[in-house]
Amino acid sequence: MKIHLWGTDFRRSSAEMRKKLAIGLPERQGKLKNLIDLGFKDIIYLWTCNRVEFYTTAEDYFSDTRPLWLSVLKQFGLDEDDYYRGYHFEGKSALRHLMRVASSLESMVVGEPQILGQLKGAIAFNKENNLPIDKHLEQCFHLCFETAKKVRTETAIAEKPVSVASLGLKYLVSMESEYPLEKAVVVGRSPISLMVLQWLKKNRTDIPVIWVNRSVDVLKSYPEFQGIELQSLADFLKGQTQFSHLFTSTASIDPIFKKSFFEKLGRGKKLVFDFAEPPDVEHFVLEPVRIIHMEDLMDEARTNSLERAESVAVAEKMIEEAMRAYFLDQKEKPILRDFNNIEPEFLKELESAILMIEKEVPLEFQGRVKKIAEKLVRKNLHLSREHLREILRRVASTETDLISGA
């Protein structure tokens, strides 16, 4: 099993450590190329609010990739102790972890829907930027996508889907008497930001909303922008736009909103939801601004995990069954593994054999032999490929019996 990974998450490391491992989109392609040059075959980089992971392909399960991971950490200004603040999986353990991540079993909010899209985005980034992906690693990712989809459709884990954004909006509703929603600002175009916009449009139709982003033009390609005022981040940071609620979720590595920004706004109650990790809003105390950071949602997330315990148990069984089927398929005898390669030649040889009948069979028998051959073709080729596979399985089994009895 060739898949290896190193990563860390909200359970094992601080937000500050994960911030050091963040790679912004503008420099991501170049940075990943530099990491691959350290000796990797490929690297798929996953970055979410609560985790960062690097996936790669090694020669086999036994390959010692620890020196490579240490060299990666060094590139980010981290040391050997930080290696142990994360996790390093190989082979089956790595695939199982990837399946759990894709199925949202490892998320801070179990069942949240964003993680699957983030994983698909991670592999798409490599393809779009001509970064290498070993076919075996890509195969593992697609297996995880299929399994995660099955988990979401066949268990209750997706019932009343819960995300970090929905937890924050629950806070908003519970605190509306103290912090009346009069004007909302949504910053960024992450899945969380889009979810907030959709919720506001559906549930607070009379509340004016401003959508803020570094580039305003890019927002116009989203259907959510209809009927919403757009503003550039540069203009918004001037502190001239008043609001009662601010929701922010960007990929910025450094805080965007500092104490000085809120001081420019003057007095007036404000409720701020910072859904970003690293945080978009620095930690400070300023009356009457109330800031809800990611860590403030942790208790609610733990309750969510307990409520979904039964679904998690079912999902784990589904993951193990998917792994079992995958690995047994990988261990099929070479004659079965190579079937896709030999099938075209197999068909060609059968066709040639039928055409040879006229040359090799006496005239009086040709009609009968052709009918027999045509029946064989219809039976063995015009049915499913699995029919041929079953024939090959029997042949392989007979060969194994002969060898063991020799």
Image (spheres, grey):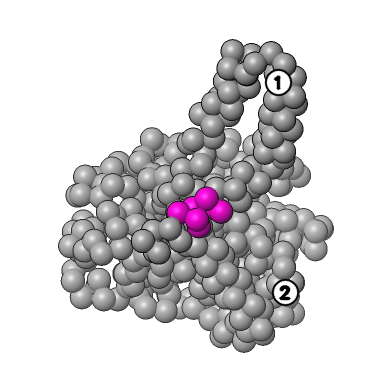
Q: Which residues are magenta?
A: 393-399
Position above or below: 249 against 88: above
Circle on res. 156: 2
The answer to which quarter of the image holds residue 259 is bottom left
Instruction: Determine the residue positioned at 30% across, 76% down.
Output: 85
Q: Position of residue 193 (x, y in %)?
A: 61, 57
Q: Is residue 227 left or right of residue 110?
A: right
Disc 2 is placed on an element classified as helix
Q: Nearer the viewer, residue 154 or 389?
A: 389
The quadrant in which residue 112 appears is bottom right
Residue type at mark 1: give it.
Phe
Task: Report which residue position mark 1 lands on.
Answer: 365
Calculate the distance from the C-alpha at mark 1 to the C-alpha at mark 2: 65 Å
* Magenta span contains residue 394: yes
Mark 1–mark 2 CB contact (< 8 Å): no
Relative vertical location of residue 85 with respect to residue 370 in this rendering, above or below: below
Q: Residues within 10 Å of mark 1 (few under 14, many from 20)?
A: few
User: Where 282 sits versus 57, above or below?
Assistant: below
Where residue 41 sits: x, y (%)? 28, 47
Q: Helix, strand or loop at disc 1?
A: helix
Q: Nearer the viewer, residue 42 or 206?
A: 42
Q: Main secondary structure of the magenta part?
A: helix
**Residue 186 in which image quadrant:** bottom right
Q: Is residue 133 magenta?
A: no
281 left or right, relative to 149: left
* Among numbered discs 1 and 2, the one appearing first in the sequence: 2
Q: Position of residue 45 (x, y in %)?
A: 39, 54
Q: Nearer the viewer, mark 1 or mark 2?
A: 1
